[in-house]
């Protein structure tokens, strides 16, 4: 039986889902308000003192509206709040509430446990190599060259 070689983006996506599912299960078992993967991504992208929506959208690679929707539901859950940005009268910052900080600490501990479990499964040296490769600067993605053929 020959298997089809999966491409790297697919493998990275599966790895991300493994962590997301493990994290969601761990948070649920600790009584943290249920969150979705996009909400988790927003939560993880926040700076300690808060982050503007536009910056969150850039970090997450999504539209501002997507950030607004995720933030709104996390505000309603009591995990985030919107506060004035001291650097800009027109902007507001999204930041964790006290309950959000507690949830973030629980999530960090759960992620540490997931990494430990992964190290048990694939080996500590393989995990260290994976982390090293992912932390290395990759530079900008190569530009796609579009073929410009004259139309008949």
Image (cartoon, helix red, strand yellow):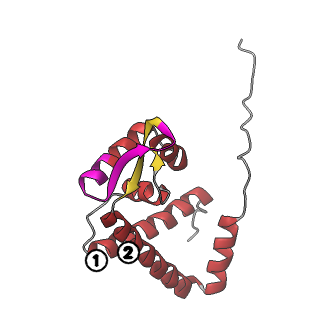
Position above or below: 1 against 35: below
Residue 7 appearing in the image: no
Task: Find residue 75 and report its horizontal and vertical position in percent.
Answer: 29, 52
- For this rendering, which residue is in front, 60 or 87? 87
Q: Residue furthest top?
A: 152
User: Residue drawn at (37%, 47%), measured in percent from left and top?
Assistant: 83
Answer few, some or many: residues within 10 Å of disc 1's Cα (few below 14, many 20 plus, some between 14 and 19). few
Q: Which residues are magenta?
A: 72-88
Identify the mark at residue 21; answer none if there is no mark.
none
User: Residue drawn at (33%, 57%), measured in percent from left and top?
Assistant: 36
Q: Quadrant of residue 27?
A: bottom left
Position of the N terminus, as image quadrant, is bottom right
Position above or below: 40 against 88: below
Instruction: Check disc 2 and report the residue beneath it.
Output: 106
- For this rendering, which residue is in front, 51 or 108? 51
Task: Find residue 38 and report its horizontal and vertical position in percent.
Answer: 40, 53
Residue 67 appearing in the image: yes
Q: Which element is circle 1 on?
A: loop
Position of the C terminus, as image quadrant, is top right
Q: Is residue 94 left or right of residue 29?
A: right
Task: Find residue 103 and report its horizontal and vertical position in percent.
Answer: 35, 69
Q: Which element is circle 2 on?
A: helix
Q: Are marks 1 and 2 in contact (CB under 8 Å)?
A: yes
Q: Is residue 65 left or right of residue 55?
A: left
Mark 1–mark 2 distance (CA, rounded to whole Å): 8 Å
Answer few, some or many: residues within 10 Å of disc 2's Cα (few below 14, many 20 plus, some between 14 and 19). some
Q: Quadrant of residue 99?
A: bottom left
Instruction: Check disc 1 and report the residue beneath it.
Output: 30
Task: Find residue 8 and report its horizontal and vertical position in percent.
Answer: 62, 60
């Amino acid at each position: 039986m020959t298997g089809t070689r999966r491409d790297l983006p697919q493998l990275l996506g599966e790895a991300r889902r493994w962590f997301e599912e493990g994290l969601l299960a761990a948070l649920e078992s600790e009584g943290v308000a249920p969150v979705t993967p996009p909400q988790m991504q927003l939560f993880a992208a926040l700076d300690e003192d808060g982050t503007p929506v536009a910056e969150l959208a850039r970090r997450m690679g999504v539209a501002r509206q997507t950030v607004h929707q995720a933030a709104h539901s996390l505000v309603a859950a009591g995990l985030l709040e919107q506060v004035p940005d001291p650097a800009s009268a027109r902007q507001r910052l999204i930041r964790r509430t006290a309950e959000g900080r507690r949830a973030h600490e629980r999530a960090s501990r759960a992620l540490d446990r997931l990494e430990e479990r992964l190290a048990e499964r694939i080996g500590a040296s393989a995990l260290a190599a994976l982390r090293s490769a992912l932390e290395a600067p990759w530079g900008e993605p190569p530009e796609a060259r579009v073929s410009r053929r004259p139309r008949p």
